[in-house]
Amino acid sequence: MFEMDSTAVLLWGLLFGSIGFGFFIYGKKQKSVMPLITGIALCVVPYFIANVYALVIVGVILMAIPFIVRI
């Protein structure tokens, strides 16, 4: 169904998933919605993006959202 073209996609997905898990735990403990949603998105997005460059761009944008948007 989904194909991983290279190990770079796998490693970037692991990195963004780990950061997303950290955002998720932080959002859950602080009861903050934005880091919680961003953490879930960072954990799920690497499953659907197979292009390395697109994955890095989307991951960096998702990591910046909690610092830009304050809810």
Image (cartoon, rainbow, N blue to C red):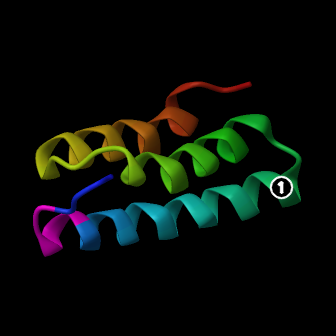
Asked if residue 7 lies left or right of residue 29, the reply is: left
Measured as percent of width and height from the top left, residue 52 is found at 15, 52
Residue at (47% x, 64% y) in the render: 17
Q: Main secondary structure of the magenta part?
A: helix
Circle 1 sits in a helix, a strand or a loop, which is it? Answer: helix
Q: How many marks?
A: 1
Report if residue 8 lies within the magenta region: yes
Q: Residue 69's spot in the image, x, y percent?
A: 58, 25
Q: Residue furthest front?
A: 1
* Picture residue at 19% right of the left edge, 40% below the top: 54
Specify the segment rendered in magenta. Answer: 5-9
Q: Amino acid at mark 1?
A: Lys
Please name whichever residue, 31 or 49, is drawn nearer the observer in this view of the structure: 49
Q: Is residue 9 above or below residue 37?
A: below
In the rendered view, would you say 21 is above or below 57? below
Identify the image quadrant of residue 13. bottom left
Residue corresponding to mark 1: 28
Q: Residue at x 31, y 38 (%)?
A: 58
Q: Position of residue 1 (x, y in %)?
A: 33, 52
Q: Quadrant of residue 53?
A: top left
Question: Residue 25 appears at what percent x and percent y?
Answer: 74, 64
Q: Is residue 25 left or right of residue 48?
A: right
Q: Please determine whether, in this image, residue 9 is positioned above or below residue 49.
A: below
